[in-house]
Image (tube, helix red, strand yellow):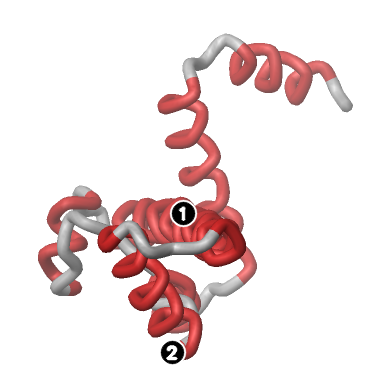
Amino acid sequence: MNSSLSALFHEAEQLDNRSLDTLIANIISLRVQRETPDYQKTEAFLLKKINKSLSIDQIERFKVLNQKRLDETISSEEYSELLVLLDKIEKLNVNRLKHLTSLALLRRVTVRDLMKQLGISNSLNG
């Protein structure tokens, strides 16, 4: 790594997690812009990633398991399965937010404004 990259990395090490996530999203956005000179292709790529979700079967299974949890009739095996699905949903939401941030930067709007433009509620879910 050359000295300027080392200096940048050292500066990044000093950032709190939120600032680091913003920096990463900005860098990813820059990289996507460089790799895909066509603005519409970039948007399409990000929108595809933003709209990624669990399969219909997984969503239905999540609903069943979550209702059992609420009814307090869930078995330990089902609860483990529910936790796996919740982990998948959480990962999808983290990735969705990263891609929303990249698209917001590309469009030069806030993430909140972008979500309004796209009709996405504040409660992200898989």
- On screen, residue 59 versus residue 118, left or right, reads right
Q: Which residue is mark 2?
A: 56
Q: Residue 52, percent across and down? A: 46, 76
Identify the element where label 1 is drawn: helix
Q: Earlier in the sequence, mark 1 or mark 2?
A: 2
| The quarter of the displayed image where residue 2 is located | top right
81 vs 37, nearest the viewer:
81
Q: Quadrant of the C terminus?
A: bottom left
> At 78% from the left edge and 18% from the top edge, which residue is drawn?
6
Amino acid at pointer 2:
Ile
> At 34% from the left edge and 52% from the top edge, which residue is drawn?
105
Q: Which residue is mark 1?
A: 90
Q: Residue 34, percent across and down? A: 59, 62
| The quarter of the displayed image where residue 24 is located | top right
Determine crowd level at label 1: few under 14, some 14-19, many 20+ residues with C-alpha closer than 10 A: some
> At 46% from the left edge and 54% from the top edge, which residue is drawn?
90
Question: Is residue 66 placed above or below 57 in the rendered structure?
Answer: above
- On screen, residue 16 versus residue 14, left or right, reads left
> At 55% from the left edge and 44% from the top edge, which residue is drawn?
27
Determine crowd level at label 2: few under 14, some 14-19, many 20+ residues with C-alpha closer than 10 A: few
Amino acid at pointer 1:
Glu
Residue 72 in sight here: yes
Which residue is the extreme one toward the right? 1
36 vs 16, nearest the viewer:
16
Residue 39 in sight here: no
31 vs 17, nearest the viewer:
17
Q: Residue 45, percent across and down? A: 49, 77
1 vs 124, nearest the viewer:
124
